[in-house]
Image (cartoon, coloured by chain):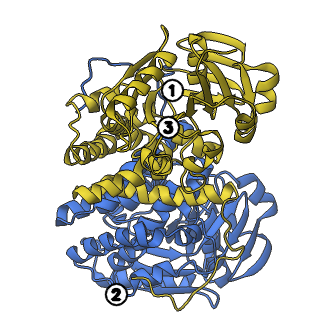
Chain colours: A blue, B yellow
């Protein structure tokens, strides 16, 4: 009989596999994972992890590996924590619907370790009696078919998305309990008072270097070497800092410098750029779409980010077509009567 | 003994081969061409041209085919017209230096059938006693290793770049003489009073659809279908029209509509996007760089175009590296003391 909390991690890709390994390494929970595309391989051979934090790990497997969420729901006690490390693509699959089979009312704490901004709202709306935690991670890790390459130290901030149906104490204690399960001597996992602060802070990187690298098709090192930090990255970062300020979050003056040194020594290709190269849809709506909505609400101009967003919307259209989510007519439609102005 | 004017065309690629074919088809000149990469193939087998204007043409060759400009300079009488249809890449090869061996003082008229803006200035500075003509062409033609696919009707406006050392009459008469050599019953080649007008007009397409397709990696049809015309193409076009106006050129109110119907029925991939996919450097400086210089001089704000330009500068860096014009350090340099702000 297991007296450890049951943890289910959904989406054990580049980031998720490292998070899962850290949780398992800690031995304070009973860990199950849901693996999508690489299920057959991982089920047999486990993961190979090449990590700046853990060195080379061969054949790692957690207690349970499931090919999908229904299998994970059928096989176990209620989950105390459901950790979601999938891409967040509300235009394709809503997280709140995805996790429905594994969320037990009042019991399960949902942990979103995902890129993006304002992610908690739909979860809390659907599960008002469950705590929803926020995990903001800097990790620099990619999945090459079950082979994980982690090139940056795992730094994660855990907080909660405030849920007015629950007390501050309950939410804070769940967040701290999860930090205990997840924090090891190899990573840096800390509790943070304010999820909004760490979301905005990470957005200074993800809304700029991540999106810009995707459009120009290169890594953060070449963006720097070409003069791109001065010409476009920093102006875009300043817009995010201005939105945060108008939204009540003061980011420290060193934020820009910190973010631009984040990949020091590494010709790093950010996650959105990797997605684009693989032909996968982009986390555009939760990264830039949600931010620009807030910018409009608080009345901050975002001339650089708005152009980047408009360009990436076209990229997203192309990627959705490539991935089969939409189709375009075989012959380009002609509408001579349409007047563009 | 030839009593026809000697015409040399440099750069017989997608656009150049169709221009050359039209000039040759007219039989009013003795045509030589310089062919770069496809020389061996074209010298033996000629061009295959699949054209909306000419149908399918097999094995077409002009009077002379040369592998380089020095061979063209050595082999012939002075050239009456040197037609340049290469890419215009001043950051890699200046046109005024390239054509030096084939320009005869006072005799040779230089014709630039190239994308871009403000192209005549360096030619006139170096060859003040020669006429320099401007050719603005809409043609929709690409070269696949000696096989030319022309999907749009050839429409070209010829004018002159004003040269204060020469009379208006001389320049205008050379322009009209060239129109006679080049205009056929298959194409639409006309003399235009004002090269600046047609350059600005074409820039409304090339500064926007051409650049945007390059960044988002798709064609003008998918830009339209994804909503990109409204979100970014038209705002960018309006900036170009505003710069033109401040620079004394009034583009007609239908320009935006005309440009956006230009590729009707065709999922058209513009030239810069094709260059980018082939790994070739972009005509960024003559298309957007020169325009933004003028915008600064006339005091017009260009928030959309400036972002597009900054992004494409990074793309150009990547493409120059790919093509071997620049190298980056194997390990990304770390400068911890650098403070970004």
User: Viewer-nearest of labels 3 and 2?
Assistant: 3
- Residue occupying the point 32% across, 83% down: A251
Task: Give percent across and percent down for residue A109.
Answer: 44, 71
Q: Which disc number belongs to residue B140?
A: 1
Judging depth in this view, the residue of B339 and A163 nearest the camera is B339
- Location of residue B92 in the rendering, given as x and y in whole percent from the top left corner: 60, 55
Q: Earlier in the sequence, mark 3 or mark 1?
A: 3
Which residue in the structure is indicated by mark 3? B114
Q: Is residue B270 above or below residue A251?
A: above
Residue A253's mark? Answer: 2
Residue shown at the point (59%, 9%) measured from the top left: B55
CA gap between label 1 and label 2 equals 50 Å
Marks 3 and 1, Cα distance to the nearest angstrom?
13 Å
B54, above or below A122, in the image: above
Dot 2 falls on which chain?
Answer: A
Callouts 3 and 2 close, C-beta under 8 Å: no
Q: Is residue B47 above or below residue A162?
A: above
Of the 4 image quadrants, the one containing the N terminus of chain B is top right
**What's the CA distance linking mark 3 and mark 2?**
47 Å
Secondary structure beneath dot 1 equals loop
Q: Position of residue B47 (x, y in %)?
A: 71, 20
The answer, for residue A133, to whether it is visible in the render is: no
Q: Is residue A90 left or right of residue B27?
A: left
Q: Residues within 10 Å of mark 1 (few under 14, many from 20)?
A: many
Q: Nearer the viewer, residue B147 or B134?
A: B134
Residue A4's image quarter?
Answer: bottom right
- Where is residue B196, by image quadrant? top left
**Secondary structure under badge 2?**
loop
**Residue A307 visible, this orientation:** yes
Q: Label 3 crowding class (10 Å Cα cut-off): few <14, some 14-19, many 20+?
A: many
């Amino acid at each position: 009989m297991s007296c450890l909390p049951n943890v289910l991690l959904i989406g054990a890709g580049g980031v998720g596999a490292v998070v899962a390994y850290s949780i398992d390494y800690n031995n304070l929970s009973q860990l199950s994972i849901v693996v999508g595309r690489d299920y057959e391989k991982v089920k047999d051979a486990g993961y190979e992890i090449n990590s700046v934090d853990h060195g080379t790990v061969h054949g790692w497997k957690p207690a349970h590996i499931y090919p999908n969420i229904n299998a994970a729901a059928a096989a176990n006690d209620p989950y105390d924590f459901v950790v979601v490390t999938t891409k967040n693509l509300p235009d394709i699959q809503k997280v709140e619907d995805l996790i429905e089979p594994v969320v037990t009312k009042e019991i399960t704490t949902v942990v979103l370790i995902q890129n993006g901004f304002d992610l908690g709202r739909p979860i809390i709306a659907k599960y008002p009696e469950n705590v929803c935690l926020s995990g903001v991670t800097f990790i620099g890790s990619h999945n090459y078919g079950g082979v994980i390459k982690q090139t940056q130290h795992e730094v994660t901030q855990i907080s909660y998305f405030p849920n007015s149906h629950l007390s501050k104490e309950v939410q804070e204690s769940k967040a701290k309990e999860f930090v205990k399960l997840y924090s090891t001597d190899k990573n840096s996992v800390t509790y943070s008072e304010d999820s909004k602060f760490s979301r905005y802070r990470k957005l200074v990187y993800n809304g700029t270097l991540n999106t810009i690298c995707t459009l120009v098709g290169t890594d953060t090192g070449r963006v720097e070497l070409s003069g791109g930090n001065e010409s476009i990255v920093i102006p875009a970062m300043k817009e995010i800092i201005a939105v945060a300020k108008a939204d009540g979050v003061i980011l420290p003056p060193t934020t820009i410098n910190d973010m631009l040194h984040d990949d020091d020594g590494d010709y790093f290709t950010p996650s959105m750029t990797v997605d684009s190269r693989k032909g996968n849809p982009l986390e555009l709506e939760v990264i830039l779409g949600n931010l620009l909505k807030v910018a409009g609400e608080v009345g901050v101009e975002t001339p650089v980010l708005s152009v980047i967003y408009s360009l990436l919307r076209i990229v997203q259209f192309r990627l959705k077509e490539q991935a089969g989510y939409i189709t375009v007519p075989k012959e380009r439609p002609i509408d001579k009567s349409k007047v563009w102005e």
